[in-house]
Image (cartoon, rainbow, N blue to C red):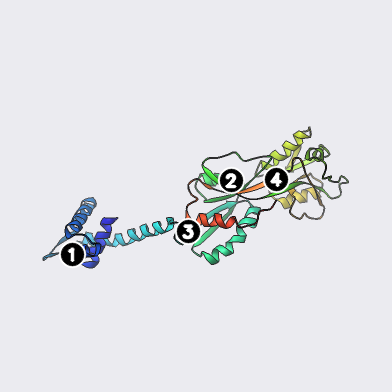
Amino acid sequence: MRRLETLLLLSRRGSMRAVADETHTTTSAVSQQIAALAREAGIALIEPDGRRVRLTPAGRRLAEHAVTILAALEAARLDLDPSAEPAGTIRVAGFGTAIRRSLMPVLSRLAADHPKVRVRIHEHEPAEALSLIAADDIDLALTYDFNLAPATPDRSVVSQPLWSTEWALGVPATDPVSGDPEHSAAAVFARYRDHDWIVNSRGAADEQVVRTIASMAGFEPLVTHRADSLALLQDLVVAGLGIGLLPADQPTRPGVRLLPLRNPCPILRTSAVVRAGRTGWPPLALLLSLLQTVPARV
């Protein structure tokens, strides 16, 4: 890079002496830099011009390339400089609730305060998002697991906790059975041992929770329907086609009742996941910091 800088200066200043004066070195050192660059390029870059030198046609072409090369290098340095203004495109994949609850609240602030940072959003369930992280197809994954179905530790990624929320059992509002906060989750599940169950179609975490609590209640749940959409799950509950887990902190549609679950209580935990070693990239570090400002919910 130093040799390209020397060549570019020579093309602009026109003499070895001028370049030496600007770089606080000697004409001999300048000449050695140009000679080394010519050997690497495999072609003469300068030629005599009276008592001075001038660039050959090849030298002028390489000087033109040097402008682009050195500009790209400087851009890369600024991009990686923690003290520089963050700039770049962050590719984010996450499940819908996390995108709405964690990411979208900070996007307007990000656009206003750091316009050089752009975010590209893809909706994916945790397993899909983590696969994209592993393939380096995204920079940040918004994922979840449950306290009763914890994610498998992975040393290739770094996870930053975001927010968490309790989940409950969604049953038809017409069901005469009422939830008793004093009853354990296993006792609540036991009342529904003969019902059909609904679980996620794109992830296994909530099904693992259902099977764990059902096992505590002494039965194997009959999983009949699978739905990725919580709205669709509620429609199936209203239609009397089954029951399933739902967030306890979100409103339900008419016809759905939430029964609280205790001892144990299923808690969904969300995380921002990045590849190990990437947290220092300024745009990503900025977004991770902003995500921490979104209030956690339990």
Disc sitting over residue 88 in the figure = 3
Q: Is residue 288 visible?
A: yes
The residue pinned by badge 4 equals 267
* Viewer-proximal residue among 22 and 226: 22
- Residue type, mark 3 in image: Gly
- Residue type, mark 4 in image: Ile
Dot 4 or dot 2: first in sequence order is: 2
Q: Position of residue 107 (x, y in %)?
A: 58, 61
Residue at horizontal 74 percent and vertical 48 percent from the top = 246
Work out which residue is located at the far right of the displayed protein and give it: 176
Q: CA distance from mark 3 to mark 2?
A: 24 Å
Front: mark 4 or 3: 4
Q: CA distance from mark 4 to mark 3?
A: 35 Å
Q: CA distance from mark 2 to mark 1?
A: 61 Å
Dot 4 or dot 3: first in sequence order is: 3
Work out which residue is located at the far left of the displayed protein and give it: 50
- Residue type, mark 1 in image: Arg
Mark 2 crowdedness (10 Å alpha carbons): few <14, some 14-19, many ≥20: some
- Residue type, mark 2 in image: Glu
Q: Is residue 187 left or right of residue 210?
A: right
The residue pinned by badge 1 equals 17
Mark 4 crowdedness (10 Å alpha carbons): few <14, some 14-19, many ≥20: many
Q: Position of residue 66 (x, y in %)?
A: 30, 60
* Viewer-proximal residue among 194 and 149: 149
Q: Is residue 202 left or right of residue 52?
A: right
Residue at horizontal 53 percent and vertical 54 percent from the top = 91
The residue pinned by badge 2 equals 128
